[in-house]
Amino acid sequence: MNQNLTTDRETFVTHLECSITGERYEADQLHGLSRAGRPLLVRYDLDAVRSAVSRDTIEARPTDLWRWRELLPVRYTANIVSLGEIETPLVPLTKSGGPNVLVKDEGRLPTGSFKARGLVMAVAMAKELGVTKIAMPTNGNAGAALAAYATRCGIETIVFCPDDTPEINVREIAMQGARVWRVNGLIDDCGAIVGKGAAEGRWFDFSTLKEPYRIEGKKTMGLELAAQFGWKLPDAIFYPTGGGTGLIGMWKAFDELEKLGWIGSKRPKMFAVQASGCAPIVRAFEAGEEHAERWEDASTVAAGIRVPKAVGDFLILRAVRESGGQALAVGDPAILKAVDAAAKQDGLLLCPEGGATLAAYHQALNTGLVDEDDKVVLFNCATGLKYPMPEAPQALDRTRPIDFDAL
Ligand SMILES: *Cc1c(COP(=O)(O)O)cnc(C)c1O
């Protein structure tokens, strides 16, 4: 853990706010959704932050997630639970992407996905606010990150995942100390079980956006991008969108950075990328709706974005529209082709959800939504190593003559 954390420091949080009605909620209390049933957003005294730190102070610190301490909600440093949340690199994808395409490779984070950003924050806040038992629905990666951080600070966790969740994710969750259950349904069916138990007072509900702090953790993706681009922002961001926490978080980060005077008013076009087999946000975007209806019979190889219904739908749609971006759907064949191209041509192993952003980039390029000169960031949200790979069955018998020309 870095040396910024050796002293306790007050947070700059002033209050929380309902994302739809603007109603105020007190800081330092346990909250779920707002009374209107919508996500709560954390608000800071940004004038005080500006007086306390500068861009230079931040840049002089070690490049990890906690360098953004003043823009994060944890009040007491002792409550921070860390597994080493590094700043993730921007890796050029010159051959399978193009000359101005960078991949923010989130697979390097603890537990191998960007869920670590959200959960490291949410768990620290749960610890701070005295939570002892947490339940969560997950497609895999969120459950793994929750299990890891909660176990590390002694919070009990119960995780529910669809029964076709990849085996490796389920085992990872169990291995890291959670009780994990496979449920014969989709993630929102799992969410219903979590909600029922929470209503009975059995545990705290950690579903995406149903507690306020995962957005704050995911916000650090936007903060990092600003610093990595020299306090400017890229022209376009392609984000694989399930619950949309990351897209909403980055949009919030840009807003806070502008209010601090650390960046200007220029924003990237935000592209919410979904799979054709589960594209509720794309459908709502195209229909001009403010909310997205549940997508029936959701199915895609990109399990992380198989989210039929998102409680923050209107926040995703709002950010995408304000940015001048779009919601785009790509089919499974295009996703798998993109994963293959990035690995074979650029040596970077993407997860399917990351592959979806590469496929969507090419779609956007072909339809003129972006052009080749645009500086573009694609999100690889998890390490490709957690996913099945094609067989490589060739074997060599060393006891027989070897045809070296054929190797
Ligand atoms: C959770 C997840 C997503 C979707 O992220 P959201 O911010 O919830 O939209 C995409 N890809 C992977 C691998 C994930 O685990």
Image (tube, rainbow, N blue to C red):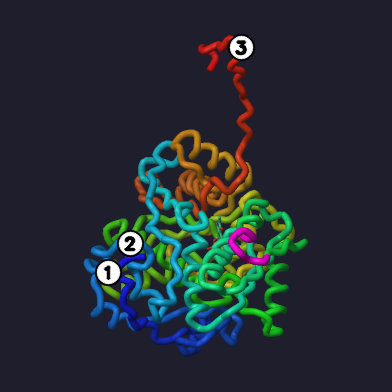
Find numbered disc 3 in the image and state the secondary structure of the residue it sits on: loop
Residue at figure coordinates x 43%, y 68% from the top left: 219
Q: Circle 1 — which element?
A: loop
Residues at badges 1 and 2 in contact (C-beta under 8 Å)?
Answer: yes
Judge from the rendering whether residue 91 lies leftward or rightward of residue 403; answer left or right.
left
Quickly name the residue at label 2: 226
Identity of the residue drawn at 51% across and 80% down: 40
Q: Is residue 399 visible?
A: yes
- Asked if residue 120 lies left or right of residue 401, the reply is left
Image location of residue 43, percent across then percent down:
41, 81
What is the distance, in whole Å, between disc 1 and disc 3 at their CAs? 66 Å
Q: Nearer the viewer, residue 47 or 259?
A: 47
Q: Looking at numbered disc 2 in the image, what kind of residue is underneath it?
A: Ala
How far apart in space, not on screen, are marks 1 and 2 (Cα)?
9 Å
- Is residue 381 or residue 145 the one in the foreground? 145
Q: Residue at x 28, y 83 (%)?
A: 48
Task: Name the one closer to the observer, 384 or 228.
Answer: 384
Horizontal and vertical percent for residue 17?
Answer: 48, 84
Cα distance in 3D space between marks 3 and 2: 58 Å
For label 3, the residue is: 400
Q: Is residue 332 left or right of residue 94?
A: right
The residue that mark 1 highlights is 262
User: Foreground residue, 383 or 402?
Assistant: 402
Quadrant the N terminus occupies: bottom left
| Amino acid type, mark 3 | Arg
Q: Which portion, as a residue range, is magenta?
A: 173-179
Q: Residue 180 location, x and y as percent?
A: 68, 64
First-in-chain label (3 vs 2)? 2
Quarter of the image for residue 273 reads bottom right
Which mark is first along the chain, 3 or 1?
Answer: 1
Q: Is residue 318 above or below residue 200?
A: above
Vertical placement of residue 392 versus 232, above or below: above
